[in-house]
Image (cartoon, helix red, strand yellow):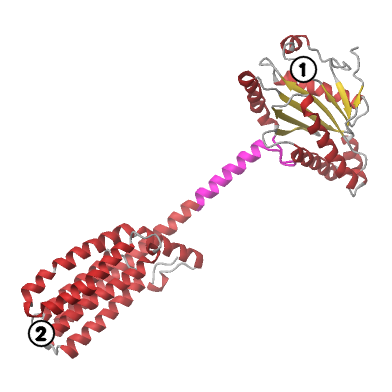
Amino acid sequence: MRVGFFPSLRFQDPALEASFRSHDCLATVPVARFCYFTGCFLWAAFGVVDVLLAPERLGALWAIRFGVGLPALALACIATYSTTLQKSLKLIGVAVTLICGGSIIAMTAVLDSPVADSYYVGLILVIFCSYIFAQLRFFQAVFSGIGLLVLYEAVLVLHQRASFSTIVNNSAFVISTIYIGLFACFKLEQHRRVKFADQRTIENDNRCLTQLASDLEYQSSHDVLTSLLNRRQLAKTFDDAVERFVKARQATAVMLIDVDEFKQINDQFGHDVGDEVLRQVAAAIRANVRDRDAAFRYGGDEFLVLLPGRTAVGSVAAATQIAASFREWTGAAVTTAGTGIGVSIGVTEIVSPLDTLRHIMGLADAAMYEAKRRGKGRIVIQPRSRERASERRRQHREPSGTVLEECSDLDQSGATSPRPRPR
């Protein structure tokens, strides 16, 4: 917004200009309310002047004062309490200025010189209060000021036929008041516009900083390719699951998902196809877990899902649905790479306050590799006994080729294979 010339009191952006005008009206409500409330008191109090200066014309003067001017001020004061009318407070200020100023001029028309000559002081007071306290915008002040000046000069010259010295004296004071008032209006509006623009800039900067912080926080906690949580968030989420078990004895299923033959896909079809495969696995996971579940890209082509409130056996349906959803995409994929791709899923659960992330991931990883060993594209589930969890944790070993105790395995159609014996 330029501020060097009078026509510059306007924002180039129409939306910003409309926003300023609405804000300007609402921001000046307290001072306008004070202006109109004080105006009612002073307007009525000056009725004493009518009694002292022109008792013979008191009826006409009071008809104008209390029948026109005072109701206008009272209604304007009431309007400051209406949320609907507050948005039009500047236009109300113009109307009150013209009505009250016109009332003073009408009083001078009723009276004869020299008494009438003293009433121009009331016109100056009206202009001063309207320009400074009602805080009219500059061009509104110009319109109301010129209108009252023309009306006053017409009454002064044509109706009263005042002396030349009276015309010069009164006109000089009224014109000077309007000039000074317009300058004050201009500077006040300029200040309000600059302050509004600065405030909008600060708000926009704060929004940008907030958005930037939000984006950085999101990027630090989510995987760029799949938009799933990354491993940085896993430790805290795992600790929450253990705490949930301690407080409510609530198990949390842990599901480790691995894409079969992913290296061959990258080598044969390129990393772009491989990335699309990973995105589709992530989409299958998101489509089949609850809002309270937490899904992670654990690393490479491995994905991890924590399902609070579910046991390993209770998560069979979710695991089967994830595998089925991914198969639907592979069946419809345009590229040859989309044919015959599956996922192997290993599932275990958190059932002890002594469970650690390393221990649980070892169990889930062993179950997942057992699924691959049995032909890939399978789901191997290892339920755990809460009573034996602590003992089993101490006895657990993870040498290559070990078949997990109490494993059951499902192919991805949902059929259960015979449970293998420990070797």
Quadrant in which the C terminus appears: top right
Q: CA distance from mark 1 to mark 2?
A: 108 Å
Q: Is residue 221 magenta?
A: yes
- Check residue 112 in the rendering and tell me which mark sits there, or answer none: 2
Q: Residue at x 21, y 61 (%)?
A: 38
> Tag 1: Cα neighbours inside 10 Å, few (<14), some, or many (≥20)?
many
User: Which of the two discs, 1 and 2, labels the residue nearer the N terminus?
Assistant: 2
With 242 as the anchor, is 202 left or right in this view?
A: left
The amino acid type found where label 1 is placed reads Arg
With 384 as the anchor, is 151 left or right in this view?
A: left
- Check residue 384 in the rendering and tell me which mark sits there, or answer none: 1
Q: Residue at x 33, y 69 (%)?
A: 92
Instruction: Examine the rendered structure and indicate whether residue 75 appears above or below residue 289.
Output: below
Instruction: Examine the rendered structure and indicate whether residue 114 appears above or below residue 96.
Output: below
Which x, y percent locates residue 245?
65, 20
Q: Secondary structure at mark 2?
A: loop
Which x, y percent locates residue 43?
18, 68
With 265 as the anchor, is 238 left or right in this view?
A: left
The amino acid type found where label 2 is placed reads Asp
Region of the chain picked out in magenta, as a range: 204-229
The residue lying toward the viewer, choosing from 330 and 268, is 330
Which x, y percent locates residue 88?
38, 67
Residue 357 visible, this angle? yes
Q: Quadrant of residue 338?
A: top right
